Amino acid sequence: MKNKKKLAILGSTGSIGTSTLSIVESFPNRYEVEALVAGRNHAAILSQCLRWKPKVVAVATEELAAELSIQLRAAGQTEMQVLWGTAGAIYAATLPEVDFVVSAIVGVAGLEATYAAVCAGKTIGLANKECLVAAGELIIAAARTHGAALIPIDSEHNAVHQCMRGGTHAEVRQIWLTASGGPFRSTPAVDFETITPAQALKHPTWVMGQRITIDSATMMNKGFEVIEACRLFQLPPEKVRVTVHPQSTIHSLVEFVDGSILAQLSVTDMRLPILYALAYPERVPSDLTFDLASLSYLNFSPPDLDRFPCLRLAYEAAAVGGSSCVALNAADEIAVAAFLKGEIPFMGIPRTIEKVMTETPATHPASIAEVLAVDEWARTYATGVVQSYRAVRV
C-alpha cells in the first residue's frame, strides 16, 4: 500500500465535506485528514476535530477560533493549530504536507484559498462551481503554470472527466451535461411568476442547500456548469450542450467526432465522484453499485430557454467571459437570497441578473483581487435592483 494521501478539506461541515469524511472513514488506509476549513457551524467542526484530529483547522472568525481552541484544550487536544478567516483557509490549503485539497466552500468565499492551493501546485478536487465561474480563466492559467491538477467532483463534470478518458481532446465533438429539469420542467410559463420559495425548494432528485436548489429550479445551476465545463475541458460554449434528463441516471455524455457517444451512469450519491477524484487515476472498489435492472427508461429533451432564461444568460456570459461571469454569479446569489425572503418574484431572479450583466463593464480581471472587486460591485448593483422591486411592491 502506498503512503496515505493527506487531505485538506475546505468546507468540511457542508454536504461535500461530510461525504468526503465518509470516504476517509471507509478507506482509512488510503486517506488521512491533515486540515479542515469550516465556517460557523461550531458544533460540527468541534466534533470533526475530535474525530479526525487534523494538524490545522480554520473557522470563519477570530471569536469562533478562540472558543474552539478552549474546547479543544479542555478535551486534551493541545497540538492542533486553530486559525481563522481567509488567511487561515489559505494556510490550511497550502500546507506542504497536503497532497489533495477538496474545494467545497460555497460561493466566492472559497476562491482565495482554492487559488492559493492551485498556485502551490496541489491536486484539487473541485466541488465549488463559483471558483471556475468567477475566476476560471485565472485558475486554469495558474494550474498550467504551477502544474496543479484539477479534478472535478461536481457529478456532471466528474462524469465528463471519466468519459473523456475514452479519447483525446481533439477527438471530442461536443459534451452533453444532463439536467433533471428541476421541479418546474413541466410547469406552464404563465405560472412562473407565482412560484413560491416553498415550491422551488422541492427538488425532485437531489437534497441540496437552499441556493443550489433554487439555482436548479431556475436552471442557473446548469448554466454555471456550462461555464465550468468550458473552463475545465477547454471547449467553447457551443460545444457544451445541455439536455434535460429527469431520471438523473446518466450524469453526462461525451460525443466524439466519429459519432460515438460515451455516457457515465451511476447511483445518485456524491460519494462516488468524490472517491473517483480522490483515487484518480486509480479506480477503487466500493459498494456504490448501480442496479441496471431498475433502469426501465431514459428520457432526454432540449431545455426551454424562454422558460428558463437563466440558462440563456449563462451561455451569454460564457461567450463573453471575464467580468460577465463574475457578475452572473454575484447577481444570482443576491437575487436568490431576495427570492427566498419574498422580496422578489421567481422570475425576478433572471430579470435582476440580466440588469446587472447589462451594466457590467466588459473586462477580464487580471488578479483574484480584481475578480473580488467586480464581485463586490455586482452585488451592490444587484442589491439596488432588488430594492427597486421592494419599492414598487410597497
Image (cartoon, grey):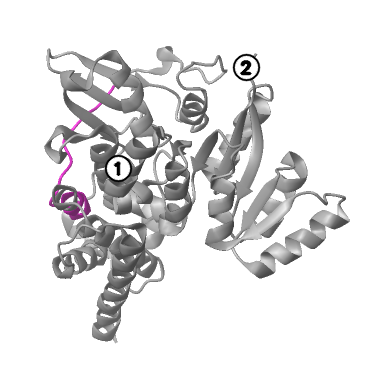
- Image height check: is 64 above or below 138? below
Per the image, is 12 magenta?
no
- Indicate the secondary structure of the residue bearing disc 1: helix
For this rendering, which residue is in front, 260 or 295? 260
Tell me which residue sits at (34%, 26%) in the image.
161
| Dominant secondary-structure state across the stretch colored magenta | loop
Instruction: Give the residue pinned by disc 2.
Output: 2
For this rendering, which residue is in front, 167 or 115? 115
* N-term-proximal mark, 2 vs 1: 2
Tell me which residue sits at (65%, 37%) in the image.
33
Q: Does residue 59 appear in this view?
A: yes
Under mark 1, the amino acid is: Ala
- Image height check: is 393 above or below 31? below
What is the crowding at mark 1: few (fewer than 14 residues within 10 Å), some, or many (at least 20)?
few
Residue 369 in the image: state x and y as whole percent: 36, 63
Instruction: Give the residue pinned by disc 1.
Output: 141
- Indicate the secondary structure of the residue bearing disc 2: loop
- Image height check: is 328 above or below 179? below
Question: In the image, 56: left or right of 99?
Answer: right
Under mark 2, the amino acid is: Lys
Which residue range is magenta in the image? Answer: 298-314
Q: Quadrant of residue 345?
A: bottom left
Residue 44 in the image: state x and y as whole percent: 68, 52
* Quadrant of image for the C terminus: bottom left
Residue 335 in the image: state x and y as whole percent: 32, 66
What is the crowding at mark 2: few (fewer than 14 residues within 10 Å), some, or many (at least 20)?
few
